[in-house]
Image (cartoon, rainbow, N blue to C red):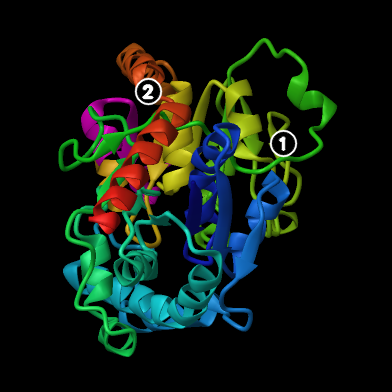
């Protein structure tokens, strides 16, 4: 079986699909990624790709989001207008990747296309080729209906390729534990196998420590806007070690860090978090899902693009605390770290994740799905 993966040209949208791609390779199937930009991270994971939009610069395409919605990072919820702008932007991104994707698929002739939930061009291409489409979620918050909302901004692409609409019976693979899923379980649940790249690890990270260790990350895009200064100040008064896993952030302006705060730069979360007791973050999908899989209590200061629903779901399930930046202080940190109920809930969700079907099991289902698709095509 040939499986073509298509992702938006964003690192955080591509990494979650790699474990399933590995599983398919391990089962003897041919796998190819058709992506662009930051999606090239797959090559470091031993997977091959074709660049479907070599000149695409996705960063400037998100400028309308910040121009239209002032105070994006200070608000406490994602507004309908903001969500609509996000769908519009991803519609434009997919319009740019669709031609290259269709061309690549025409050459490679896949049996099935797996696409991330924001990469609607993958669903368009599957409909054009008459093969199964599989949507792989990359967010903790529900992606139900997201592909359809994005596709509504791609009318030019659908007309260009003579496609009437998205596939009628797409399969959805989701990696959010069912008890955390904000809008209820749907599709095929799959165990999340955290992967965020590889790196040479510092010696201190592999050494035992007598005190709790708290990871602090603001993701790959929030950095300079996140409440890092307040977190550093509060951490200095807490009996725990804090690791600032933040890249691209100028910490020198804060002078000497407290003795229990270490500036680590970028470390793959799939390596860092297993060695930590808890994590403070911005609500991004990769961080949230990794922490759930590892059973770590979370303290979320949500911000950025649509992270509020995820943060609220974490709070409702009891695996963490959803707070606003103006609540940051040593007392909040102490209460959170000492909360037995949060630790128990996080352990429960970890057990739930471990009981879900592994990527290799989902790979077998995809093989059967492709076989049924080939059988229908012969009829």
Q: Is residue 35 visible?
A: yes
**Quarter of the image containing the C terminus?**
bottom left
Question: Along the polypeptide, which appears first: circle 2 or circle 1?
Answer: 1
Q: Is residue 70 visible?
A: no
Q: Residue at x 29, y 62 (%)?
A: 75
For the residue labelled by badge 2, is the local secondary structure a helix, a strand or a loop?
Answer: helix
Q: x, y (%) of residue 206?
A: 76, 21
Up the image or down, 337 lies above or below 62; here it is above
Residue 290, image x, y percentages: 48, 34
Up-down: is 101 above or below 141?
A: below
Residue 294 in the image: state x and y as whole percent: 48, 23
Q: In the image, 336: left or right of 261?
A: left
The crowding category of the residue bearing disc 1, from other C-alpha atoms within 10 Å (few below 14, some 14 to 19, many at least 20), is some
Q: Which residues are magenta?
A: 313-328
Q: Residue furthest front?
A: 379
Q: Nearer the viewer, residue 136 or 328?
A: 136
- Residue 110: x percent and y percent? 47, 58
Q: Residues within 10 Å of mark 2 (few under 14, many from 20)?
A: many
Query: For this rendering, which residue is in front, 363 or 330?
Result: 363
**Left or right placement of residue 183 versus residue 242 in this view:** left
The answer to whether residue 339 is above or below residue 81 is: above
Identify residue for label 2.
353
Q: Is 324 colored magenta in this rendering?
A: yes
313 relative to 214, above or below: below
Image-quadrant location for residue 57 = bottom right
SS type, badge 1: strand
Q: Is residue 104 left or right of residue 371?
A: right
Q: Which residue is mark 1?
A: 262
Say if the magenta span includes residue 72: no
Out of 300 and 188, give the one closest to the viewer: 188
Q: Residue drawn at (28%, 71%), measured in percent from left and top? A: 150
């Amino acid at each position: 079986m040939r499986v073509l993966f298509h992702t938006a040209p964003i690192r955080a949208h591509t990494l979650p699909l790699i474990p399933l791609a590995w599983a398919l390779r391990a089962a003897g199937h041919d796998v190819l990624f058709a992506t662009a930009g930051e999606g090239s991270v797959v090559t470091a994971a031993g997977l091959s790709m074709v660049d479907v939009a070599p000149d695409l610069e996705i960063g400037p395409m998100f400028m309308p989001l910040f121009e239209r919605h002032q105070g994006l990072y200070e608000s406490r919820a994602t507004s309908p207008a903001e969500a609509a702008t996000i769908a519009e932007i991803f519609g434009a991104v997919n319009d740019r990747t669709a031609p290259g994707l269709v061309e690549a698929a025409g050459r490679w002739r896949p049996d099935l296309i797996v696409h991330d939930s924001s990469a609607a061009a993958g669903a368009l291409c599957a409909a054009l080729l008459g093969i199964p489409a599989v949507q792989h979620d990359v967010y903790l918050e529900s992606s139900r209906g997201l592909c359809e909302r994005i596709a509504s901004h791609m009318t030019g692409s659908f007309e260009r390729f003579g496609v009437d609409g998205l596939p009628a019976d797409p399969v959805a693979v989701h990696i959010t534990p069912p008890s955390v899923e904000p809008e209820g379980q749907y599709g095929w649940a799959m165990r999340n196998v955290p992967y965020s790249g590889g790196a040479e690890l510092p010696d201190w990270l592999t050494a035992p420590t007598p005190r709790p260790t708290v990871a602090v990350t603001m993701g790959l895009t929030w950095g300079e806007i996140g409440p890092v200064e307040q977190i550093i100040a509060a951490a200095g008064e807490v009996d725990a070690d804090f690791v600032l896993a933040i890249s691209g952030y100028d910490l020198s302006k804060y002078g000497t860090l407290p003795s229990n705060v270490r500036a680590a730069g970028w470390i793959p979360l799939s390596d860092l978090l297993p060695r930590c007791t808890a994590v403070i973050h911005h609500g991004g999908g990769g961080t949230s899902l990794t922490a759930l899989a590892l059973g770590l209590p979370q303290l979320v200061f949500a911000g950025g693009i649509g992270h509020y629903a995820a943060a609220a779901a974490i709070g409702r399930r009891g695996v963490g605390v959803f707070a606003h930046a103006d609540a940051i202080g040593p007392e909040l940190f102490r209460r959170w770290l000492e909360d037995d109920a949060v630790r128990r809930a996080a352990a429960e969700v970890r057990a739930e994740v471990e009981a879900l079907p592994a990527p290799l099991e989902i790979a077998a289902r995809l093989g059967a799905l492709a076989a049924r698709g080939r059988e229908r095509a012969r009829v």
